């Protein structure tokens, strides 16, 4: 029993960065921008958050954990949003090819993260690490008093604040897209630029905002990966620490058929698959087969979604296209 | 009393790639009137209206609304000034409901109140005599329903100047009639309405005044009461044109294609063509009439080898007078071509099946000759020559032969396609709705091209929708009704009523 609870607990922790990445990319794609730079933006968010927190602790006389955590969040969001902003200038204003630009952003972000991660480490002699207090801020349960309730406590109330934050973002984003005027406008932009424009929507503004905010949210996912200590090392820079989570997020957007609330379940499913090998080791099935599972699930979902052809589950119709009003 | 001008345009100029689409155009629209904007394809009507709607920004010139000078930078500015445009290609989001499309981009409470919006949409519908379900998704709607949504969309925004770009091009006659009633209601309500159309009968029936553009320049405005179809055409073209279609007597007709019992089922298993038989003779034009969707498209595509027909159908092609026939059924288009069958096809879907929109004129010419090169390389010279010839002889308005065809206006696209198909020296030429969406002058150019082919001994098959034209142009007219041949009549002696009756009921029933 405890094993299963521990397994589910670990699955949720593993799902959290995926959920953040998926939500950010969903918002981006709803504006018609296919930003393949999620992996890069996660790197950028991760290193910026770590660096912000680290330098704050070095410079402050008595660093407070909550300030450190806040600085990390803000830095991660802004730095990843900056990456998305570069992408936006190139694809929206200069109408560059979105796929190529996104791939470039991934390569750039990975280099950016690893370079500064190691640079800060080297300049301080060894490796960069934030204080125990900050680590605790990122990893301790948000509701310690509730987490002692048997079973339910561990399963529902023992997670760090990032997990609840990502859930809140997911639910808010779902409400925003489904029930608000601005959400409707954003969906229209992604569906058909020209229609949205003719209806008086500022297409460029919507695309910039959705892409940058979406990028910022994926950056929080990167920060989570850096700060999370469930794998033993938290609050330090590990070379290539994002390790494909950004790419999984891009796939998850399709898995969740561009639906933020569904993204919660999909991220959880992927989180479960990715920690399965630690909790159900098998002598017969090699580990590499376990590692394939999330990707295999993506392929199966892609096939089912395209077979069903339900209109509501299709990607935003203008995904990947640039828009110029006076084009003929 | 002279009503104040709703809109006044002064010296509007707009250039695309150094080609002026509008050159110093001046125009006035009054409150409480319907103004028709008339002009040939590519004369700049849509461009001018897009400037009013905020899609294009003019290079120079001024716009006055209600006497005040205004600058329209975006569609939002246009709405704020009370201008609403219903574009020819609807600007709707397919997987949203009608109500969602209508409130798109509007300010209001952050949360969408779908019930209140639906109620207001219904209210507008009732006021002007529309029928629309606000909760229906756009992808479930027919063309006329979509148009209704577009009109309500602009009315919902409080627009009192409405611009409609070719609103009837896709509507049935009854739907168009209904639309005109609505427009008249709105005019009587004091709104200013501009409609762009090619159908001169509609201009005469619905508008109060007619403004004419010619090659991007303003050619004048007349009161509809004082105008005739003939005078308007002359204003549009700038010279006297004969509105009579020539019909030379067929010389020495020989059978070129004998179609026997062609039968076909569509994807749902429904019998779309039922035992259709006819003979096409060289030196004559065979018209095909019918309510749209009665199998015209499938018939032509079946003959061309693109649409599947049952194996017992037969299409015999006679290349010469020796009576030796080639069977086309069961062969793919490439096999048909390799057999040396001189069959040309101008399909209904010009930029889908006929031409490749993103390729230039030369490359599109090459679609028929790309196999002619050596060692896997193509020979670009003949198609380039052909492109130059077609542009010159058919007066295609284009910046050059390297312009992608999708950038050309509808009429010019059609000229390129027809030019290419005729240049292939066909023995049988099939055309589907060859003049759809074309202005009157271009239409007459196409008619005379077909007549030239006829005189050269080609068997021309002309699928058309305008019965007047069919009766003037064709030697014989085959009438389809629900995929069956209702009868074949003589183009010289048949009447419109007779064909109309045959289109709706089969021949045997007519005799009773």
Image: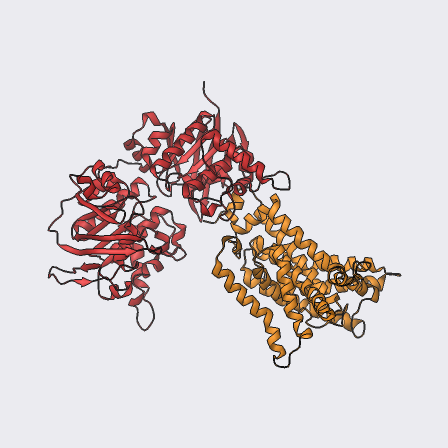
Query: In the rendered image of this protein, does residue A289 appear above or below residue B104?
Result: below
Q: Which residue does the image show at 40% across and 30% down from the upper left?
A: B181
Whether residue A161 appears in this view of the structure is: yes
Query: Residue A161 is drawn in which quadrant?
Result: bottom right
Query: Residue B313 is drawn in which quadrant?
Result: bottom left
Query: In the rendered image of this protein, does residue B181 appear above or below residue A14?
Result: above
Horizontally, is A301 left or right of B231 in the view?
Answer: right
Quadrant (top left/top right/bottom left/bottom right) for the N terminus of chain B: top left
Query: Chain in orange?
Result: A
Whether residue B36 appears in this view of the structure is: no
In the rendering, what colour is chain B? red
Quadrant (top left/top right/bottom left/bottom right) for the C terminus of chain B: top left
For the residue pair A243 and A165, the one nearer the viewer reads as A165
Query: Residue A152 is drawn in which quadrant?
Result: bottom right
Please provide percent x and percent y for residue A293.
59, 71
For the residue pair A187 and A59, the one nearer the viewer reads as A187
């Amino acid at each position: 029993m405890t094993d299963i609870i521990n397994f589910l607990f670990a699955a949720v922790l593993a799902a959290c960065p995926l959920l953040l990445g998926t939500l950010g990319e969903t918002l981006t794609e709803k504006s018609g921008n296919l930003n393949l730079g999620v992996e890069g933006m996660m790197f950028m968010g991760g290193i910026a958050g770590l660096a912000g927190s680290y330098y704050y602790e070095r410079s402050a006389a008595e660093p407070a954990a909550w300030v450190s955590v806040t600085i990390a969040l803000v830095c991660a969001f802004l730095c990843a949003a900056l990456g998305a902003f570069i992408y936006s200038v190139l694809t929206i204003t200069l109408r560059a090819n979105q796929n190529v630009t996104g791939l470039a952003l991934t390569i750039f972000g990975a280099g950016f993260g690893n370079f500064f991660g190691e640079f800060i480490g080297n300049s301080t002699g060894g490796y960069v690490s934030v204080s125990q207090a900050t680590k605790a801020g990122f990893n301790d349960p948000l509701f310690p008093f509730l987490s002692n309730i048997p079973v339910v406590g561990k399963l529902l109330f023992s997670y760090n604040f990032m997990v609840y934050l990502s859930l809140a973002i997911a639910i808010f984003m779902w409400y925003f897209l489904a029930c608000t005027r601005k959400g409707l406008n954003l969906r229209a932009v992604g569906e058909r630029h020209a229609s949205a424009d003719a209806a008086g929507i500022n297409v460029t503004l919507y695309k910039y905002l959705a892409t940058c905010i979406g990028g910022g949210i994926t950056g929080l996912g990167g920060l989570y990966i850096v700060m999370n200590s469930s794998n033993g090392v938290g609050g330090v820079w590990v070379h290539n620490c994002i390790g494909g989570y950004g790419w999984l997020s891009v796939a998850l957007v399709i898995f969740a058929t561009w639906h933020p609330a569904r993204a919660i379940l999909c991220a959880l499913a992927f989180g479960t698959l990715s920690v399965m090998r630690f909790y159900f080791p098998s002598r017969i099935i090699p580990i590499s087969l376990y590692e394939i599972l999330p990707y295999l699930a993506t392929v199966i979902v892609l096939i089912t979604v395209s077979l069903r052809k339900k209109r509501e589950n299709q990607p935003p119709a203008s995904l990947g296209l640039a828009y110029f009003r006076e084009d003929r | 009393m002279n009503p104040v001008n709703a809109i006044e345009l002064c010296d509007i100029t707009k250039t695309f790639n150094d080609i002026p689409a509008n050159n110093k155009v001046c125009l006035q629209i009054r409150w409480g009137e319907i103004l028709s904007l008339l002009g040939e394809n590519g004369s700049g009507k849509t461009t001018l209206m897009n400037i009013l709607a905020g899609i294009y920004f003019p290079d120079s010139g001024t716009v006055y609304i209600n006497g005040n000078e205004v600058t329209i930078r975006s569609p939002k500015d246009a709405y704020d000034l009370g201008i609403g445009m219903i574009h020819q290609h609807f600007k709707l989001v397919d997987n949203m409901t009608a109500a969602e499309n209508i409130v798109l981009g509007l300010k209001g409470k952050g949360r969408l109140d779908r019930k209140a919006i639906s109620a207001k949409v219904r209210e507008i519908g009732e006021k002007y005599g529309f029928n629309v379900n606000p909760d229906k998704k756009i992808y479930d709607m027919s063309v006329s329903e979509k148009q209704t949504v577009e009109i309500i969309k602009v009315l919902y925004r409080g627009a009192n100047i409405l611009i409609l770009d070719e609103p009837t091009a896709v509507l049935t006659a009854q739907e168009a009639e209904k639309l005109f009633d609505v427009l008249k209601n709105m005019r009587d309500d004091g709104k200013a309405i501009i409609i762009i159309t090619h159908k001169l009968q509609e201009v005469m029936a619905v508008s109060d005044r007619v403004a004419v553009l010619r090659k991007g320049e303003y050619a004048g405005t007349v009161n509809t009461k004082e105008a005739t179809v003939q005078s308007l055409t002359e204003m549009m073209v700038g010279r006297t044109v004969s509105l009579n279609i020539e019909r030379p007597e067929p010389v020495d007709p020989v059978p070129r294609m004998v179609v026997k019992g062609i039968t076909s089922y569509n994807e749902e298993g429904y019998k779309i063509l039922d035992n259709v038989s006819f003979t096409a003779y060289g030196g004559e034009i065979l018209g095909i009439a019918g309510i749209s969707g009665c199998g015209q498209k499938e018939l032509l595509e079946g003959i061309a080898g693109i649409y599947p027909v049952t194996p017992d159908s037969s299409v015999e092609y006679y290349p010469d007078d020796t009576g030796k026939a080639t069977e086309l059924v069961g062969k793919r288009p490439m096999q048909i071509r390799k057999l040396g069958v001189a069959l040309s096809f101008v399909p209904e879907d010009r930029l889908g099946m006929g031409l490749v929109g993103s390729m230039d004129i030369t490359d599109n010419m090459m679609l028929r000759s790309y196999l002619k090169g050596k060692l896997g390389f193509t020979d670009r010279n003949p198609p380039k020559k052909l492109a130059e010839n077609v542009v010159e002889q058919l007066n295609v308005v284009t910046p050059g032969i390297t312009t992608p065809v999708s950038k050309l206006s509808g009429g010019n696209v059609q000229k390129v396609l027809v030019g290419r198909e005729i240049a292939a020296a066909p023995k049988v030429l099939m055309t589907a709705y060859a003049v759809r969406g074309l202005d009157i002058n271009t239409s007459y150019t196409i008619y005379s091209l077909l007549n030239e082919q006829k005189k050269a001994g080609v068997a021309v098959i002309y699928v058309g929708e305008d019965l007047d034209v069919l009766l003037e142009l064709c030697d014989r007219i085959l009438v389809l009704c629900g995929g069956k041949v209702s009868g074949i009549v003589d183009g010289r002696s048949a009447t419109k009523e007779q064909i109309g009756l045959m289109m709706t009921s089969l021949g045997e029933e007519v005799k009773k």
